[in-house]
Amino acid sequence: MLRTQVAIVGAGPAGLTLALLLHRIGIAAIVLESRSRSYVESRVRAGVLEHGTVELLCEMGAGDRLRREALTHRGIALRFNDESRRIDFEDLTAGKTVTVYGQQEVVKDLIAALCVAGVPILFETPALALGDLEGEHAGLRYRDAAGAEGTIVADYVAGCDGFHGMCRDALPAGASAVYEHVYPFSWLGILAQSPPVSEELIYTNHERGFALVSMRSPTVTRLYLQCPANEELAEWPDDRFWAELRLRLGSDRGGPDVVAGPVSQKGITPMRSFVTEPMRYGRLFLAGDAAHIVPPTGAKGMNLAIADVRVLARAFEAHYFRHDSSGLDDYSETCLRRVWNTQRFSAWMTRMLHRFDDRDPFEHRLQLAELRYVTTSRAAAQTLAENYVGLPFARADDLS
């Protein structure tokens, strides 16, 4: 039997960030991860970091490689009616930017920092069951890499194991409410060995559907197309993808020129919004995708997960060192204020940029009017910019 103050389920950005934050303030933690280290370090997911996320990673000592290798973006382009219009983040947010740095790179940096610190991460060790969540200590049963079962006794458990993890399922029936919206389309995404189309992201509203031009490095591009929700990958050979992307970008009409390259990854991402309320039950705290999912249009998923555990780490610090449990008691309410604001922003971006088959031409004209307004009104552009770079933690969750 193992004993710790905080047992963390999941070695994604949320769980690893929480573990490092707790180590830095002197709180013991153990991280359990069902997958291997090589798997979690190569799992390609989000890649846009908010201004505050970058600051936090650097403050924790996990930002050295990020500072050297990441791409700083000072704005984005919104493209519609075969014209690109830029949103200047630096000008609109007093110098703030976003940073392009893949989630797998963040995970590598956090794991390296935790290994140096001696914080235990048990890879290939799935959590099997949670118990005594309303008792004096929580019990967490697991199976290690050799197949042997064991138990961790912890003061608290942080469920950072994602949308399909076991922690949320451990909540008793009726203990939480679920709010969900499933969009009638998905994103078809590729990772290609190809020079970026642009120095900054391009969000495109086109009559055939949304397109997004992103990147991971000066030689690797990340590209997305809106596709039907029930689409199959087999229907999208590489040649079809590149042709459709060129069409939506207007490459033959003066739009960005796409250079096709070898495709190293291809996948389809469902579009959904999901929130569990509350984000706490007894000694279990949910964080990240275990508690909420946002559509990727606003580039918020990883940032929101890291914001959750920042709140949780501060609450644990107050609890253990100042005997003040108010932060733990308020954890769910505090996080949900930021979660719902982020849901609002992500849903707004999604509605503004995608084609909805059930909408009539009138509603499409409203989309174009919204895009024109956002790109010509400084007040409207500032609203987009300040949400995209990330609202200050104190503004978004009332922390002071």
Image (tube, helix red, strand yellow):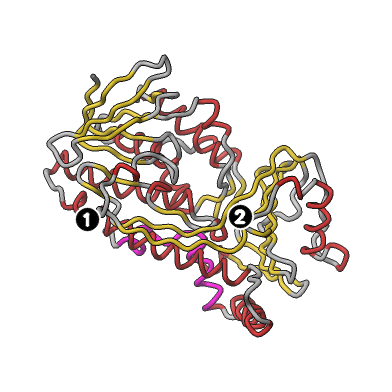
Q: Is residue 353 visible?
A: yes
Of the residues shown, which amino acid type is indicated by label 1?
A: Asp
Q: Identify the residue at image location x=33%, y=38%.
A: 21
- Crowd around label 2: few <14 · some 14–19 · many ≥20 (10 Å): many
Q: Is residue 58 visible?
A: no
Res. 135 image quadrant: top left
Tell me: residue 236, above or below residue 387.
above
* Residue bounds of the magenta highlight: 379-397
* Left or right: 342, with 90 as reference point: left
Q: Main secondary structure of the magenta part?
A: helix
- Asked if the magenta segment contains residue 66, the reply would be no
Question: In the drawing, what numbered circle is on residue 73?
Answer: 2
- Residue indicated by mark 1: 330
**Residue 107 pos. (x, y %):** 49, 35
* Left or right: 312, with 55 as reference point: left
Res. 150 image quadrant: top left
Q: Give the spatial CA distance, label 2 vs label 1.
A: 35 Å
Q: Identify the residue at image location x=69%, y=69%.
A: 205
**Residue 163 pos. (x, y %):** 44, 46
Secondary structure type for disc 1: loop
* Left or right: 228, with 15 as reference point: right
Q: Identify the residue at image location x=56%, y=47%.
A: 46
The earlier-in-sequence mark between 2 and 1 is 2
* Left or right: 23, with 269 as reference point: left
